[in-house]
Image: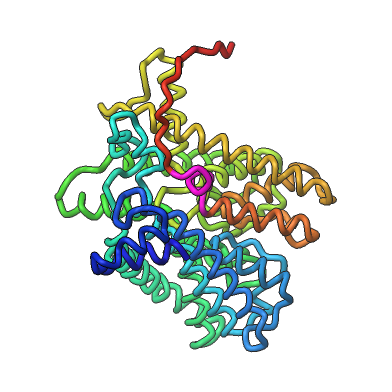
Amino acid sequence: MTCFVEGAAALTKIDPDMRPPLERWLGRPIGTRASYRPPLMLAMLYLAAIGVGAMLLMTPFAGGMPWWDALFTAVSAVTVTGLSTVPVHAILTPWGMAVLAVLMQIGGLGLMTFAVLAFRGPAASSSEDGKGDDVAETAFDSSERPIYRLPRIAFRVLIFAATAQAIGTAILAPALISDHGLWGGLGRAAFLAISAFCNSGFTPFANSMQGQEAAVLAIVAVLFVVGGLGYLVLGDLWRLMRGDHGLSLHSRLVLIGTGALAVTGWAGIMLSEPLTPFLALFQALTPRTAGFDAVGAGDYGPVAHGLTIVLMFIGAGATSTAGGIKVATMMVLVLALWAKLRNRSGPRMGGVKLTPGAVRRVFALALAAVTIIAVGTGLMMLTASRPVAAVLFEAASAFGTAGLSTGVTEEADGLGRAVLMLLMFLGRIGPMTLAWLIVARAVDNLKEGEEDVPTS
């Protein structure tokens, strides 16, 4: 409730006489930078959408899902994961599938919109000089995004997403109309385009994307890769094509990392699984974003199984519709390790040195993600009948909001499903956002000594 009052206060010109009572009720001034909490707003939006979505999926005209399955499906849709305890394509009516599509839009575009607002990290205002780390020169975007610009940002994100999804629907429609008729084909094409761009992984088919034509797989892959790059990278590419300016460091990190992960994943799957080059590439791209499955990832051998877990953990670009710790985070970790091995003072790329604050944040994010997945896996193992590798795969898929499954989700009991829902939610709002919500953005004014700790 508090965040909605703040949003209303920032989006409208409040009478100065009304500010003191509102500020007393909120406990802080309205309009100050400290009062803008996009992650809190996003979390509340998600919880509200999950509650309403679950109730709608339980209605007879949507398919009449049992409440437990409806709640799980709503969480999976809003977090754009794609895991499901039931075959949604067989249970949900066309109206129910429309509800599912709306939930995916809220989850995917909501994150993309609020992430642009929030992408000056929690520590950005807490440095000793009061200016914070120059996150524009790190893996994060530092452009100030005041809350009153939310409508403009949301409108731009919506227009871009609607355009991409409309183009995807138009290209997918002919292939699907030939198999499912005019309205059935159009509906499936629209649902698939929305799911792909939002990196959700839900499909209107029985076995995810298995058995689909190569052309359909290619179009879907383009949609989920574009959706996984992120608003900031796509904006940079658009301005680069117009000749306005070059790519930011964040965009270079994401693009280089995306290409490197695609090649590495493709090579690893090609060498370990009997797949065609095209299917191997599709399966290398999908774990980091959408979670569409064209071959049955649950039947992977140990090499492809482990590689897929790593790809799901990394995810895609920041301010995108995908999950994971993000490609830029992975790139900063790699650059920091390389700098340490070379005895450099800090990681560099393209003549730009990343700030110590950026490195600290990505290490904290990676550690939090590993901890959450490990704890989730341990809790699920209390009642799971599958090997730990399969449970770890499912936990990584849930936290990375990938949606690939080995079948553990369908077999999970109440505890397992509750853990998976929590992992999906935490994976969507992010470990760093969770820290933001708990700790807020307090300035550390303590004057303490420093001491090095040997690690080897």
Q: Residue furthest left?
A: 243
Range of magenta residues: 429-440
Characterize the magenta stretch by its predominant secondary structure: helix
Q: Is residue 374 left or right of residue 23?
A: right
User: Can residue 257 be seen here?
Assistant: no
Per the image, is 216 magenta?
A: no
In this rendering, is residue 159 above or below 98? above
Q: Nearer the viewer, residue 428 or 93?
A: 428
Per the image, is 435 magenta?
A: yes
Q: Nearer the viewer, residue 246 or 277?
A: 246
In this rendering, is residue 188 above or below 398? below
User: Can residue 202 be seen here?
Assistant: yes
What's the coloring here?
rainbow
Q: Place residue 418 in its image quadrant.
A: bottom right
Residue sitting at 51 percent across and 78 percent down? 176
Residue 109 place in picture, x, y as percent: 42, 64
Q: Is residue 354 left or right of residue 427?
A: left
Residue sitting at 53 percent across and 67 percent down? 213
Residue 433 place in picture, x, y as percent: 49, 48
Residue 376 place in picture, x, y as percent: 70, 46
